[in-house]
Amino acid sequence: MITLTINNTQVEVPEGTTILEAAKKIGVEIPTLCHHEDLCVAGNCRVCVVEIKGRPRLEASCATPAENGMEVFTHSAKVRNARNVITQLLLSEHAEECTLCYKNGNCELQNLAEEYYHDDEMFIDLAHEKEHHIDKSTALRYDPSKCIRCQRCVRTCAEIQGVNALSAAFKGKDMMITTFMEKTFGEVVCTNCGQCVVHCPTGALTERTYYDEIWEAIEDPDKHVVVNTAPSVRVALGEPFGLEPGTIVTGQMAAALRRLGFDSVLDTDFAADLTIIEEGNEFIQRLKKKFVDGEDVALPMITSCSPGWVKFIEHMYPDLLDHLSSCKSPQQMFGALAKTYYAEKKGIDPEKIVSVSIMPCTAKKFEANRPEMKSSGYQDIDAGLTTRELAKMIKQAGIDLTKLPEEDFDSIMGESSGAGVIFGATGGVMEAALRTVYEIITGREVPFRHLDIQPVRGLDGVKEATIKFENCKPEYSFLEGAEVKVAVAHGLRNARKIMDQIKEGKSPYLFVEIMACPGGCIGGGGQPIPTNDEIRMKRIEAIYREDAGKPIRKSHENPEIKQVYEEFLKEPLGEKSHKLLHTHYSKRNRY
Amino acid sequence: MASQVKRADIIFAPYSEYPYKILGEALKKSPDDIIDALIKSGLRGRGGAGFPTGLKWKFAKKAQGDEKYVVCNADEGEPGTFKDRDILVKVPRKMLSGMGICAHVTGATKGFIYLRAEYDYLKDALQKEIDFFHQHCEKYGLDFHVEIKSGAGAYVVGEETALLNSAEGKRGEPRNKPPFPVTEGFLNKPTVVNNVETFVNAMMVCRIGAEEFAKYGMRGQKGSKLFSIAGDTPKPGVYELELGLTVEELVNEFGDGNTKAVQVGGVSGFCVPSAKFKEKTIGFPGKDDVNYIPTGGSIMLFNHTRSMYHVLENYLEFFEEESCGQCTPCRVGTQQLLKGIKAIKKGKKDPAYLDTLYKLAETMKITSKCGLGQSVANSFCSIVDEFKEEIIY
Amino acid sequence: MPDTTKLIENLVEKYGKKRESLLPILKGIIEEERYLSEDRMLEVAKALDISGAEVYGTASFYSFLDLKPRGKHIIRVCKTIVCDMKGKNEVLKTIKDCLGINVGETTSDGTFTLLQTNCIGQCDHAPAMLIDGEVYNELNAEKVRNIIKEYKLNRQN
Ligand SMILES: Cc1cc2nc3c(=O)[nH]c(=O)nc-3n(C[C@H](O)[C@H](O)[C@H](O)COP(=O)(O)O)c2cc1C
Ligand code: SF4
Ligand code: SF4
Ligand code: SF4
Ligand code: SF4
Ligand code: FES
């Protein structure tokens, strides 16, 4: 242990603790910009500088380890003066247009400027003399004039995602953050996961917003606007309204959507249950083909509901695309059914249906716009909004989410099981699938207490579990005694570990779940900012609470799922399913 | 008038003794003895920062690592510096044997010379010398392999951690310190980074002994030093002089009779006006000793025909291009200083704005991440202090 | 035109398939082709199994790794203080007159590109310049004209 004083208060911390962390421990908040608890230390913005007795220079508290006997001053005159100058420098380089900025009100630079308010520009404006090109791709928007070069996005894309689509380029006054050859995000290896967006302290990197288009559709009397909301949205939407992370607002959310004027408020969780039926059956079919028919099928089968992950494998492991389940993501299954089954049942011309999804994700925007996602004959999903965009719409409508009554989803396609809900957390798809697959094969419930498959839960980067099939039904006797190893990875850098094993032919797994974002969808690129491990854990706990509280916990028991097969799809992996619920993938360039 | 500067002739002294003979003898000594001798000699790094060389080697020797590296910093990018160039051309064997001794002391088995791109023309000859050096390593049973790593045009890469990043094939951005290279350097292995001249000096300490080495130097400074002398002087070139001389002595020897100011230590050093020639001594400062100016060896003389505004503008253009750009005070600060003095000159900003800029420079000094941003204030403030009128009007 | 895929293969062979080889490989390409084209950078990324952005970000950091097409001979005139004091402007003007190009431009026949650079360590022989890595110092107008003439002649041979 190390003892030091910070602002004359003694504090004891383990060796290796930074001054920043030590200060936090005694309730001293040092401002930061380039620091993020998910990422390695950069120490480049310099706003966190502090004074250390006996040292002539100030030191970056995020990058300086605490030492025994150190006397630190975090807000002395020397520090405040320096921080003021640094803030003014950042602002001089920054196109301050807060009133025109998507991050207005949730911006770390703005907070700093507020703290170090200065009544006049201290320095010469550098921002407006350069020409800035705003990159608006399908999913993301990058405005370099708002970039403070903290490199959080660069570190995110490298350390968390292992994609390296971004880099600092040039040096000195020309230093900038950009992609290969300054191309648009749409032209490079970017997966659209939006993790860089979640980690960007300013308005430089944001999602491409579509709510204006949605308002227009809502207000168009000829349009029937259906909305579906992903499982992880309901455990995070409260945050922009000041609620604690992990507060469940499912009912208030449904009420808010109705008040915004959506014609039908439905649930992506329904489609998640459907995904489990299709994907579970696909898995069993692959096992059968492999072990009974001796066919050469790709195993492990890997989940395909995370569009960031799908784009990643298309770029990075194009030769392993066979491993991806052919199932569409819940969003796209929902979309395909909305303009067919739903339209039929409700007697609405599908041409007039606008289907909108509320997602924790930026990659869903890209997915919705994939050219192959038109199996209903129309664009299956017209727009994907992020949790943040929905919060914005609710605020625009003058609605206080916290004061709303809890309401239910509409029917049909509004009912879901607990298995659909847990799609939102890493490991959830695997758990949901196993609940159903085990039961199909053995006729019994999966042998875990309260159906909770603990080994696949939590924030470990790669998780494993083994399920033994015993007393199988006769038609699955080929699985009798089989120990099926499964794995779960989240964050694309962890995905690489699994994929490299497969590439080398050394994978011990038969079924793998991969989510692009750390923590799964609850930590998605479209979720409220900030997101860090503490907040991820709270959202995850909420997801499992929601599951535990559901009367139905297994996808195949969802009555609306039974109904859709009876009335429309007929059977899993059937002809209609293949047309509407399954897809194919394309090889993409690796660099 | 008799010359007041004391010439020394250690570094370029002809190869009367084969440098590799000294290497061979040093290899028989224990690493600790060599470290003690280096500490006793008072040798401090010749790259500019002046860290005691013996201590650096000691830390690297102590550091745990399955592999260690010895790196020779031949990036020599400081404007007005060209003395390492002459070492590389004239006495490369002394430098290489210094590296060999360092390998022996620290237990390193690999090393490289980071050669700036501007010196690519020296590469072939240097490689031949390295091959020759390797023959001697083999002969003496020293397991040490040296290669050349070429730069590609970036001043900041002379900063040791930026150099390591660059050698790893990355952008030459300086790293946070700690950890220092002696514990986590090239590829995170313990690494000694020394200037070209430092290696020569370390080798000379082994040859003539710590006491003899420490006899060189005046006014408490130890050893001799190479100076790159340029600008308004009738005899520009590389000179080996004993440390501890005053600027006045230097100007008497090298000035053109009309010297207005001397820039000591390159653009990241200090500008000394004629009124202070007497009081400023060239060497490493002790605690709070403002009258000593350390230098990597760059001395630029300006005579009265020169505009100090123009000089400062040139410096700042250099900095805003050569900053790595990663940290705020340096990336934005250098641009603001340059834009600021231009605006004042053009009358677009009030002369009082110079005070704001001065404050900015002082903030850069205490908040920048590496020595580049930290030292912009040295020249900025020293020029503004003395030549305010020239800057404003 | 050298076989460029071969070129990169050879460079990777020579320096090794590791990140540390990035700069020497890029310099090797520059030696052959004078600049790094988009295709070359992608090939290098592929060869070293790193991303295009990493290659671009690294290459753009270094002023000798040109990202724009350059002439056969690249002239870099030192513009830092001592050369500036000692007549850099005259050197520049002479080259501009001889070649009819400004700084940053390439002659229409693709022979010369004129650039400025920071201190090249020749201050004791200022003003100085580099042509393709070769040092020319103690320059004056006449000397510059002769050097350029020499290069032009050599080209015709
Ligand atoms: C911006 C900057 C540029 C530097 N350039 C050089 C250089 O060109 N050569 C050099 O030896 N040291 C240079 N240094 C100092 C090195 O960081 C380091 O201190 C030195 O190589 C250590 O060697 P020494 O102890 O032998 O001096 C530079 C430092 C900074 C901050
Ligand atoms: S990024 Fe922040 S400071 Fe900049 S305009 Fe947007 S809200 Fe304002
Ligand atoms: S969206 Fe994801 S993959 Fe694309 S740049 Fe951002 S972090 Fe990287
Ligand atoms: S885009 Fe955002 S995260 Fe990336 S460097 Fe700029 S401000 Fe930082
Ligand atoms: S001080 Fe300048 S050169 Fe050093 S790290 Fe900061 S920006 Fe880079
Ligand atoms: S938060 Fe410490 S330097 Fe940026």
Image (cartoon, coloured by chain):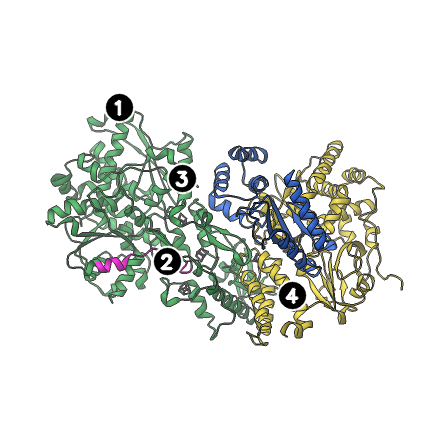
Chain colours: A green, B yellow, C blue
Co-location on one chain, circles 3 and 2: yes
- Label 4 or label 2, whichever lies nearer to me, is 4
| Residue A452 is one of the magenta-drawn residues | no
Query: Residues under labels 1 and 4: Cα distance?
Result: 81 Å
How far across and down, in percent of the image, does residue A75 sit?
52, 69
Residue at 81% across, 56% down? B241
Chain bearing mark 2:
A
Which amino acid, by three-letter code, is at mark 4? Leu
Instruction: Name the foreground residue: A174 vs A15.
Output: A174
Q: Secondary structure at mark 4?
A: helix
Which amino acid, by three-letter code, is at mark 2? Ile
Instruction: Name the foreground residue: A276 vs B33.
Output: A276
| Residue A202 is one of the magenta-drawn residues | yes
Task: State left or right for residue B20 relative to residue A163.
Answer: right
Residue B312 shows which numbered tag? 4
Q: Secondary structure at mark 3?
A: loop
Q: For mark 3, what is the residue? A: A589
Query: Residues under labels 4 and 2: Cα distance?
Result: 45 Å
Quadrant for residue B106, please give it. Answer: top right
Chain bearing mark 3:
A
Query: Tags 4 and 2 in contact by the CB under 8 Å rule?
Result: no
Query: Residues under labels 1 and 2: Cα distance?
Result: 49 Å
Query: Tags 3 and 2 in contact by the CB under 8 Å rule?
Result: no
How far across and down, in percent of the image, does residue A189 sit?
41, 44
Residue at 66% across, 59% down? C89
Residue B318 visible in image? yes
Query: Tags 1 and 4 in contact by the CB under 8 Å rule?
Result: no
Which amino acid, by three-letter code, is at mark 1? Val
Query: Residues under labels 3 and 2: Cα distance?
Result: 31 Å
Query: Residues under labels 1 and 3: Cα distance?
Result: 36 Å
Which amino acid, by three-letter code, is at mark 3? Asn
Q: Quadrant of the image for the C terminus of chain B?
A: bottom right
